[in-house]
Image (tube, helix red, strand yellow):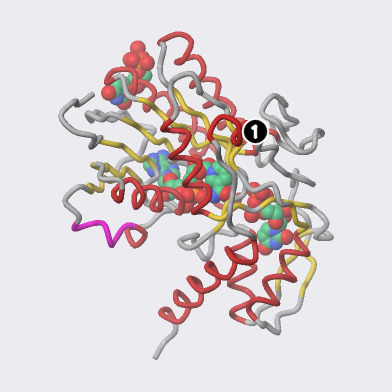
Amino acid sequence: MRQYNTTQRILVTGGAGFLGSHLCDRLIERGHDVICVDNFFTGSKRNVEHLLDHPRFELMRHDVTFPLYVEVDQIYNLACPASPIHYQHDPVQTTKTSVHGAINMLGLAKRVRARIFQASTSEVYGDPSVHPQREDYWGNVNPIGPRSCYDEGKRCAETLFFDYHRQHKLDIKVARIFNTYGPRMHPNDGRVVSNFIVQALKGEDITIYGEGSQTRSFCYVDDLLDGFLRLMDTGPEVPGPVNLGNPNEFTIRQLAELVIELTASKSRLVKMPLPVDDPMQRQPDISLAKDALGWQPQVQLRDGLKKTIAYFDTLLADARPE
Ligand code: NAD
Ligand code: UDP
Ligand code: UDP
């Protein structure tokens, strides 16, 4: 650890993705040196374009399934496709990214004695039989289905984090992230918020999978990032796992109706088949985050959606021919 000032050298894997690029912004704002590592599978240079000339920012093309030797004080491990369409595109690579990626980043953290954060997920709870989900619930996950590469990969990564913690006394921080949305989501990544907004803005049909009675709890990206930083600022006595998400729960149909209202769109709602193993409900119990981090989300879905709609509106306008 460098002692001469409070600037830390921080590695962000998956730093050119949706959450990673916001995290890079926040760390640069805090005065840190940031190394952003990404293989650009789902992320893009465009997300960090504004940082490329910054003297404290460095972008490195690298796949975390291969070893990485850099000297850093902290690591945020976010590398992994997050949308079902992308993580199911090459499921073997998804598991490799979660598992080999975790091993490499933990090995790196062990060598340089860095504090290391893992972007885990509510998917470790699978299709939960306990509602809302607390951290001590072990989950209901299908080990052999189309979502398993992601769910089980992330579960194995959590196991590795806790074994490095117990075996090598590593300072770990595991966050279980619930559905998060905001600017810089990929317009085609298939997640529900980006799909509905893009469809509404283009006047296309809004695709509801199943009856739309399944629920999700949506967190705005700025709130989530506050949670990341607060967790990373705690001492080694708080390894997690800690749920980070917004406990306000909505049905998918309610989300569609809200998007239509806020975009004043003429789009119609159409039903499509429900994907295999699609969880019926999801809501975080955030008591632990409230107690241990003094954290809770501030942004209501309506306000967060307005900001996200404004982002996609500009993005689509830029893409339109003159
Ligand atoms: P994203 O797809 O926008 O970002 C993932 C980034 O990781 C991309 O930039 C991608 O190119 C990069 N990446 C993928 N495989 C890689 C590899 N092998 N080596 C290097 N880089 C690689 O998704 P996101 O929403 O920003 O998610 C970031 C992290 O947060 C992921 O680990 C995801 O599982 C987790 N998470 C996100 C959510 C959410 O709602 N956004 C919820 C739960 C968990
Ligand atoms: N590793 C890395 N960067 C480092 C140190 C290690 O990428 O700075 C990788 C290395 O490839 C190794 C993995 O992390 O396979 C796990 O490292 P660890 O020291 O835990 O185990 P070992 O080297 O004994 O397999
Ligand atoms: N969904 C939907 N229409 C879409 C995209 C998704 O109805 O165009 C549903 C999907 O079936 C799921 C929910 O919205 O029930 C959230 O999907 P997403 O892929 O965003 O995240 P996850 O299932 O991983 O929570």
Question: Could you tell me which residue is drawn at 64 percent across and 48 percent down?
Answer: 246
Q: Main secondary structure of the magenta part?
A: helix
In the rendered view, does 175 fall on the left or right side of 109?
Answer: right
The percent coordinates of residue 109 (x first, y second) are 34, 23
Question: Could you tell me which residue is drawn at 63 percent across and 31 percent down?
Answer: 288
The percent coordinates of residue 34 (x first, y second) are 27, 43
Question: Could you tell me which residue is drawn at 51 percent across and 74 percent down?
Answer: 310
Under circle 1, the secondary element is helix
Question: Could you tell me which residue is drawn at 51 percent across and 23 percent down?
Answer: 238
Q: Which quadrant of the view contains residue 38?
A: top left
Report the residue marked by disc 1.
Answer: 124
How many neighbours does mark 1 have within 10 angstroms: few (below 14), some (14-19), or many (20 or more)? Answer: many
Q: Quadrant of ligand 3?
A: bottom right
The percent coordinates of residue 37 (x first, y second) are 32, 43
Answer above or below: position of 51 versus 276: below
Between 43 and 1, the one nearer to me in the picture: 1
The percent coordinates of residue 304 (x first, y second) are 57, 63
Magenta residues (range):
48-53
Can residue 89 be seen at all in this image of the molecule?
A: no
Answer above or below: position of 163 versus 89: above
Picture quarter with the C terminus: bottom left
Picture quarter with the N terminus: top left
